[in-house]
């Protein structure tokens, strides 16, 4: 090959090299943009969304040069707003709809831990039994009972595991989907016998004498990944730099959250959720990893279960639903001191 041709080929490869460097670089050290990019984050006012509330209240997003707007998204909307681009990120409960959206071509990914079942931790997600029911060491107490849960979700997955531990199936119980807002009354009046619930609902139900903790999700499926932070196409592709800076702020907030029930953390969560201070303090706070990593094995188990039940089009490999580069870059920035 003549020298001039080799030179032209090398020049042609330069843009590709630069693109690969851009795709892998860490967040810029100065933590600043020429303007404050707007980032719309879907959420619900739940205790489990603590890192987002802390990052907002403590100014971690502002430190990263971001203008974050929290957008209340009804749970019935699912991932549709993220798929459409109405929001850029969201905290979400693991369910089949998320993976089906990816299988059908949507550019959305889990990017960080937002809740998992840590073995030995308190029960942030559990099955509660109405007053008057005596639960036992196995699941036989559920035989013939009415159980409220969200179908095709991580709730149905782990409760089915619990039933199977006693040789039971869904044919042995009555599964019912009811709005979360009426679960407490339904337990009180006996319309349902048990309910899959998360905190602070478990604590509030026990305080009112309506129900008691029967079994925790952690005792059935240890390390179960039940929730995640997800990004849409804009943060994954168009504005990756914004996504990296968002993640630095998020992991900063997770580290503060994992300091526990400090007065500051309790005050932030009470204001964000409008819950009484004592309820926030007494509730079980869900486990979130400081490094933002997720339990891939439990998600793959959930996917296979959902596929077998006809809820899922296909079982996606991790590279199709999990994007670890943001937490990797954020951890490096925080470790080097450039994340603050």
Image: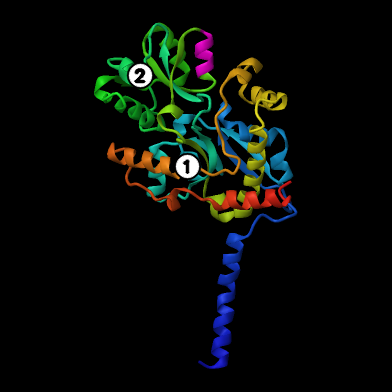
Between 288 and 91, which is closer to the camera in this rendering?
Answer: 288
Question: Is residue 95 part of the magenta span, yes or no?
Answer: no
Quadrant in the rendering for residue 313 = top left
Find residue 221 and report its horizontal and vertical position in percent.
41, 32
Rendering coords of residue 279 (x, y %): 60, 16
From the image, give the main secondary structure of the stretch colored magenta: helix
> Where's residue 17, x and y in %?
58, 71
Look at 44% across and 33% down and name the residue there.
Answer: 222
As drawn, the residue found furthest toward the left would be 171
| Residue 87 appears in the figure | no
The part of the chain drawn in magenta is 202-208
| Visual colour scheme | rainbow
What number is the disc on residue 295?
A: 1
Occupied quadrant, residue 176 = top left
Residue corresponding to mark 2: 147
Q: What residue do we see at 65% from left, 52% from top?
A: 332
Q: Secondary structure at mark 1?
A: loop
Q: Residue at x 29, y 23 (%)?
A: 166
Q: Is residue 55 above or below residue 335?
A: above
Q: Write down the quadrant of residue 278 in the picture.
A: top right
Contact? badges 2 and 1 (CB < 8 Å): no
Q: Position of residue 168 (x, y in %)?
A: 27, 24
Question: Around disc 1, counting alpha carbons within 10 Å, would you say few (fewer than 14), some (14 to 19), or many (20 or more)?
Answer: some
Badge 2 marks a residue whose secondary structure is strand
Q: CA distance from mark 2 to mark 1?
A: 27 Å
Q: Is residue 197 above or below residue 336?
A: above
Dot 2: few (<14), some (14–19), or many (≥20) neighbours within 10 Å?
A: many
- Given this view, does label 2 or label 1 mark the residue nearer the observer? 1
Say left or right for 30 vs 247: right
């Amino acid at each position: 090959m003549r020298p001039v041709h080799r030179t032209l080929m090398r020049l042609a490869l330069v843009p590709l090299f630069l693109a690969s460097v851009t795709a892998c670089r860490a967040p810029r050290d100065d933590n600043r943009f020429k303007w404050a990019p707007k980032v719309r984050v879907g959420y619900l006012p739940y205790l489990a969304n603590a890192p987002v509330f802390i990052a907002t209240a403590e100014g971690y997003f502002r430190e990263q040069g971001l203008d974050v707007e929290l957008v209340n998204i009804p749970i019935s909307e699912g991932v549709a707003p993220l798929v459409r681009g109405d929001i850029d990120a969201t905290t979400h409960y693991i369910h089949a709809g998320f993976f089906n959206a990816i299988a059908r071509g949507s550019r959305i990914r889990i990017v960080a831990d937002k809740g998992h079942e840590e073995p030995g931790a308190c029960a942030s997600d559990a099955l509660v039994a109405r007053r008057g029911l005596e639960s036992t060491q196995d699941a036989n107490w559920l035989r013939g009972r009415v159980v409220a849960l969200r179908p095709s979700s991580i709730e149905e997955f782990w409760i089915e595991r619990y039933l199977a531990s006693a040789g039971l199936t869904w044919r042995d119980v009555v599964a019912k989907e009811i709005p979360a807002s009426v679960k407490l009354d339904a337990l009180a009046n006996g319309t349902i016998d048990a309910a899959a619930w998360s905190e602070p609902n478990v604590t509030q139900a026990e305080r009112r004498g309506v129900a008691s903790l029967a079994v925790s999700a952690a005792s059935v499926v240890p390390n179960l990944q039940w929730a995640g932070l997800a990004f849409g196409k804009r943060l994954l592709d168009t504005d990756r730099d914004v996504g990296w800076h968002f993640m630095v702020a998020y992991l900063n907030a997770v580290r503060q959250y994992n300091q526990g029930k400090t007065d500051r953390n309790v005050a932030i969560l009470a204001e964000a959720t409008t819950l009484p201070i004592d309820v926030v303090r007494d509730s079980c706070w869900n486990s979130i990893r400081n490094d933002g990593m997720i339990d891939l094995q439990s998600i793959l188990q959930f996917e296979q279960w959902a596929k077998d039940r006809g809820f899922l089009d296909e079982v996606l490999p991790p590279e199709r639903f999990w994007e670890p580069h943001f937490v990797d870059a954020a951890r490096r920035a925080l470790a080097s001191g450039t994340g603050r």
